[in-house]
Image: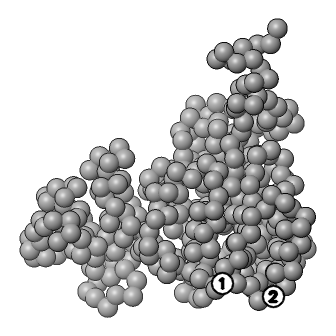
Amino acid sequence: MATNISGLDIDAAEDAFRPPLVSVIVVNFNYGRFLRAAVDSIFAQTYPNIECVIVDNASTDESDAVLRAIERDRKGVRIIRRAENGGQTLATLEGLAASSGPYVIFVDADDFLLPHCIETHIFVHLSLRIHVGFTSGDMLQALDDQVVLGTENAFNRIMQTETGKKSNATRPYRQVCGSWPGEAFDRSVLEKIRFVAPMTNEWVWAPTSGNCFRRDALSLFSDNPALASLRTGTDLYFCLGINAVSGSVLIDDAVAVYRLHGGNMFSRRPQLNHVLCYEPGGAGDSNAQAKAILIDHLIEHAARFVDRGWTRFDYARLLRRTDCSNPGVDAPRWLSRSRVADQLIARFGMVAAVLGVWQTRALMFQSGVPWKLIWRSRQVSPTG
């Protein structure tokens, strides 16, 4: 006699409960020479429930021919061809809107996933007792056809310390029914995770392709109209924001490969101790802009975050820990140092309607706003 689970026999239960769908979104611009390998790596995953969306950003190389071949060979792939290149972020958001899984992985077309990538991410997510907004797996670094580095520098800084270790933070996931994860899966990966402190305002994660996001965490930040102007730095925007609100976990196991080929938007060469692998302020460095529009979003939607269970005090701390310099502002030093100060002055009425006048003024003081400007501030309607 079949075992019953909530009134279902085991065969019916296997149909009723499946591992979560993972949406893998590939963003491509003129990486036709790498695109097929990236897509093949998605379909070589050991994880059983995946959808793939490819967004082509008006490529002018051989990408169209590669996409037509993928359409022919991979019937389940959805391909979105943009008429013009609006930047990485717009393409990412379009792919997100076209997908439906509760978990999302964004893949740069010049990277590729290792076979256990998605299985590792989902196993960790489902085993966590603290439900974080995303997990970040380590990435190998490859130059041409050779792996030249086995770890990512941001990971190394965390893993060399005791930072982020938590006892009793996991319970190894076992599927209610069905065969995933299989017996061959290495469950000891739970011994190699670290929780990231929400106070961090620095990059400590893997690049884009190493991260697996909860869709509901992404939705807290994806409706920001200013993202249309952010051509790069999408991963920084989402990772900093989501980590500040709901935390993240590092997985000290390589789940993908970062391919270095000289034309990368950000890192252009393998990481070398004490030597920058990118050009600060160069064409691929939108970090300052990404941080600034994150602050703007948090302040504009103050009611959203407080209403989601945050106390007013916690929300004030959230703004303080995500604060950054104010890019492109020709202003006094106190204002150039703090985007939060700039936005609290501009949106005082909106924030005061949520936090209260005195707590908003206290936050302005902590952000460096001079007393004379604080006392001049007055509570007005959120639309005033």
| Pick the front one: 247 or 166 | 247
Residue occupying the point 33% across, 74% down: 338
| Residue 281 placement (x, y as % from top left) | 54, 87
Do the residues bearing badges 1 and 2 touch, measured as CB atoms within 8 Å? Answer: no
The residue sitting at 12% across, 71% down in the picture is: 377
Query: Does residue 370 appear to the left or right of 142 in the view shown?
Result: left
Q: Position of residue 378 (x, y in %)?
A: 10, 69
Rendered-image quadrant of the C terminus? bottom left
Q: Given this view, does label 1 or label 2 mark the residue nearer the observer? A: 1
Residue 276 in view, yes or no: no
Report the quarter where the N terminus lies: top right
x, y percent for residue 327: 40, 83
Secondary structure state at the residue bearing disc 1: loop
Amino acid type indicated by mark 1: Ala
Q: How many callouts does the rendering have?
A: 2
- State which quadrant residue 73 falls in: bottom right
Residue 247 seen: yes
Mark carried by residue 94: none
Instruction: Reply above or below: 11 against 38.
Output: above
Q: CA distance from mark 1 to mark 2?
A: 14 Å
Question: Where on the picture, by quarter, is residue 322?
Answer: bottom left
Mark 2 crowdedness (10 Å alpha carbons): few <14, some 14-19, many ≥20: few
